[in-house]
Image (spheres, rainbow, N blue to C red):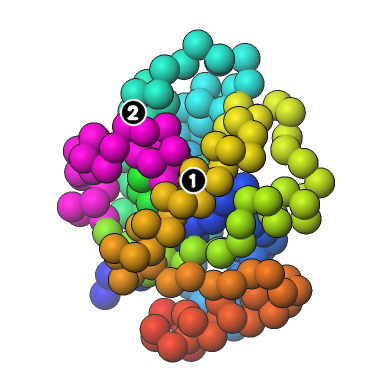
Amino acid sequence: MRGKFITFEGCEGSGKSTQLKLLSEYLKSVGADFIMTREPGGSGISEDIRKIILNGKNTAMCDECEALLYAAARIQHLRETVAPALAAGKLVVCDRYVYSSLAYQGFARGLGEKFIEEINSVALGNYPPDMTVFLDISPADAFKRKHGADKNDRIEQLGLEFHEKVYKGYKALLAKHPDICAVDCSGTKEETAEKIRNLLKERDIIK
Ligand code: TYD
């Protein structure tokens, strides 16, 4: 039986990495057959593309190039890593997916939903996630918690105004796509981890 495909979304500093680490520990403790992977990245070629996209020196990169590189990294990652794992019946947990492109490039960069959906049509058509968890915290609160942005990361450097647009983009996506589940993550990391586990149990994704 095909495995389940779960993706995680959120703004910078939403605690996504921490939550994915806690979820991974939980899945190991219950003996789940899973892989944890990320975008952009998750395969050799896609990790190389990631370095180009996020390199703080690449200030000349135009928005369309950025969107296409995310899409290119994605399809390679799907074919090389995600699809084989799903075919083997594994649970695939992925840090970011197409909703990131819609929120960041489509909404915040202003490229529009249509362009992003077009360049991600293979991902959207053939590999729709079974469920998406959105870690809901405003960028202002997230930056406060995180003590500022990473100076070497091209996207994090874009400042609060850009990240507020990303957050608005996610909110618009939430209203439109019922497969996205928002988890309020203003509490402690343990509280959020429990909310996530409960959500995945309710949806029969994990036992
Ligand atoms: P990363 O360091 O993994 O950030 P985070 O921990 O917040 O997930 O870098 C990924 C960056 O790429 C992040 O700023 C979000 C951005 N991104 C997009 O803009 N579009 C996309 O399609 C994806 C997958 C990520």
**Would you say the magenta stretch is mainly helix, strand or loop?**
helix
Tell me which label, 2 or 1, sits earlier in the chain.
2
Residue 35 appears in the picture as rendered: no
Return the residue at label 2: 68
Q: Residue at x 33, y 28 (%)?
A: 68
Contact (Cβ within 8 Å) of mark 2 with mark 1: no
Q: CA distance from mark 2 to mark 1?
A: 18 Å
Nearest to the observer: residue 128 or residue 46: 128
Q: Residue at x 75, y 74 (%)?
A: 188
Callout 1: 10 Å neighbours few (<14), some, many (20+)? many
Q: Nearer the viewer, mark 2 or mark 1?
A: 1
Determine which quarter of the picture holds residue 131: bottom left
Q: Residue at x 40, y 24 (%)?
A: 63
Residue 26 appears in the picture as rendered: yes
Does ligand 1 reach within 8 Å of label 1's beta carbon?
yes
Q: Which residues are magenta?
A: 103-127
Determine which quarter of the picture holds residue 205: bottom left
Q: Residue at x 61, y 61 (%)?
A: 137
Position of 86 relative to 77 (above/below): below
Return the residue at label 1: 166
Q: Is residue 108 magenta?
A: yes
Q: Is residue 187 left or right of residue 126?
A: right
